[in-house]
Amino acid sequence: MADLVIRQGTVSDIQAIMALEQGSIEHPWESKAIETLITDNNKVCLVAELDGIIVSYVGAESVLDESNVGNIVTHREYRGRGIATKLFKVLLAELMEKGIRKLFLEVEHDNVPAIALYEKLGFTGYGYRRDYYGKGKDAVLMSLELC
């Protein structure tokens, strides 16, 4: 995938990120939340472009030496190609460079591909949140020690 470029998200990417979310998740973020993700110094937004098209993004928010992944979305047509793995590895490197020691995330309990990705990256489960994504849609809580 020689044409895959991973870079910081910019305000001009907001519409493309919103389009990714609207086609992939049940409760997409509003443009203001994505703008804050891009512009706030305590947050990071990375996008993956393939042939100039944003096909995936990840966002995380940090407090002190911990960070939480808010969303990671890959366009349906581009899933299974390792894009999310590459994107996540860049995120991990950037967070470690900033001194983040622990990373947290929530994932829907039946999202088998996402859970497999996180486990491959070294995340472990530590709990559940009942009905976090809606009635009968529990969240698996996962974390990763970075240092």
Image: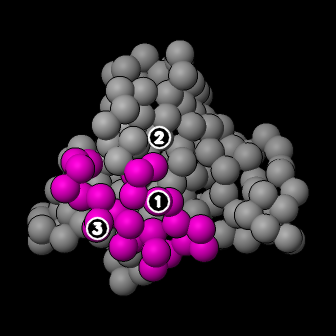
Which residue sits at x=39%, y=58%? Answer: 31
What kind of element bears circle 1? loop
Query: x and y percent of residue 46 in the render?
Result: 31, 48
Separation (CA) of disc 2 from disc 3: 18 Å
What residue span does the magenta drawing correspond to?
Answer: 9-34
- Mark 3 neighbour density, 10 Å: few (under 14) some (14–19) many (20 or more): some
Separation (CA) of disc 1 from disc 2: 16 Å
Q: Single out the mark in the foreground, 2 or 3.
A: 3
Q: On screen, 99 above or below 105? A: above
- Mark 1 neighbour density, 10 Å: few (under 14) some (14–19) many (20 or more): few
Residue with the most extreme bottom position: 77
**Which residue is denoted by mark 3 in the rendering?**
16
| Magenta stretch encompasses residue 14 | yes
| Magenta stretch encompasses residue 5 | no
The kind of residue tagged 3 is: Ala
Rendering quarter of residue 104: top right
**Which residue is denoted by mark 1 in the rendering?**
30
Query: x and y percent of residue 36 in the render?
Result: 39, 41
Query: x and y percent of residue 2 in the render?
Result: 12, 64
Q: On screen, 70 above or below 64? A: below
Which badge, 1 or 2, is on the more N-terminal residue? Answer: 1
Which residue sits at x=49%, y=35%? Answer: 61
**Which residue is denoted by mark 2 in the rendering?**
60
Main secondary structure found in the magenta portion? helix
Which residue sits at x=66%, y=57%? Answer: 107
